[in-house]
Every structure is written in structure tokens, then in C-alpha cells.
Amino acid sequence: MAVRAVRGATQIDADDRDQILEATTELVSEVMARNGLSTDDVISVIFTVTPDLTAEFPALAARKLGFHEVPLLCATEIGVPGSLPRVIRLMAHIETDRPRSDVQHVYLRGATALRLDIAQ
């Protein structure tokens, strides 16, 4: 088994608790499904949000999905002028047999603009 990092991001329409939880649930679920993961494969997850999102911690959505024994951390992205607003990002550290080239990074909704080279 190797330790790999999986990236992902999504964008929401407003700083709204329900939108943060819904979009984070979708993002985490897609990362898990596309990479064939269970929570036992996840070492840790770092969530970041742009400075305009303060209504809820994205980690709460992961907890609701069963990430009870996985260390989770939330942080704020740096506020770069002109950057995409209302973005939730994650970086999950996982144990997997997949080579680095087969890890599926997930960019959803408006966040596909962040990584047009790998967005699905």
C-alpha cells in the first residue's frame, strides 16, 4: 500500500450552511466512489474554504458520512484578489494500491474552472 493525496473542490452559490453541507457531501462521496475508497482507507482530510464561507465547517458533512475515526481539519484559503469565490476544497491522504497516475481528483460545479486539465 502507498500513501497518496487526492484533491477535490466544489463551488456553491451562497454562504449557506445547507449548501456547504450538501456540496461537501457530494464532493466527499465522489472522491470516495471514483477512487474505490472506504473510510478505512482514509488517513486524514484537510478541508479549506474561501474567506467568504463561514456558515459551517465542511468537516461536519464528512462526519455525517461516517468519518468518525478519520482526523479532519478545516482552514481558510488565502484571499487572493480575483480568485474563484465560494469554493470548498479538500485534500485527502489515503492508503491505496493505485499508482499516482490512477488517483482520480474531483472538481465539481463551478470549481471545474480551477483544474480544466483534470476536471470530470
Image (cartoon, rainbow, N blue to C red):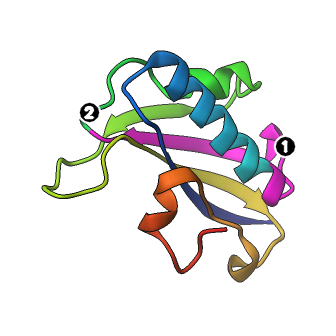
Question: How far across and how far down the image is residue 34, in percent?
Answer: 80, 59
Classify mark 1: helix, strand or loop.
Answer: loop
Q: Is residue 118 above or below residue 42?
A: below
Compared across the picture, whether 74 is left or right of 40 comes to left
Q: Which residues are magenta?
A: 33-50
Question: How far across and how far down the image is residue 80, in percent?
Answer: 16, 55
Question: How far across and how far down the image is residue 105, in percent?
Answer: 63, 64
The residue under label 2 is: 52
Front-lying residue, 29 or 71? 29
Q: Amino acid at mark 2?
A: Asp
Q: Is residue 61 above or below residue 33?
A: above
Classify mark 2: helix, strand or loop.
Answer: loop
Q: Quadrant of residue 56?
A: top left
Q: Is residue 40 magenta?
A: yes
N-terminal of the pair, mark 1 or mark 2, is: 1
How dense is the environment of label 2, judged by Cα within 10 Å: few (below 14), some, or many (20 and up)?
Answer: some
The residue under label 1 is: 38
Q: Quadrant of residue 74?
A: top left
Compared across the picture, whether 86 is left or right of 81 comes to right
Quadrant containing the C terminus in the rendered view: bottom right
Quadrant containing the N terminus in the rendered view: bottom right
Q: Amino acid at mark 1?
A: Ser
Q: CA distance from mark 1 to mark 2?
A: 31 Å
- Residue shown at 60%/50% (left/top)? 92
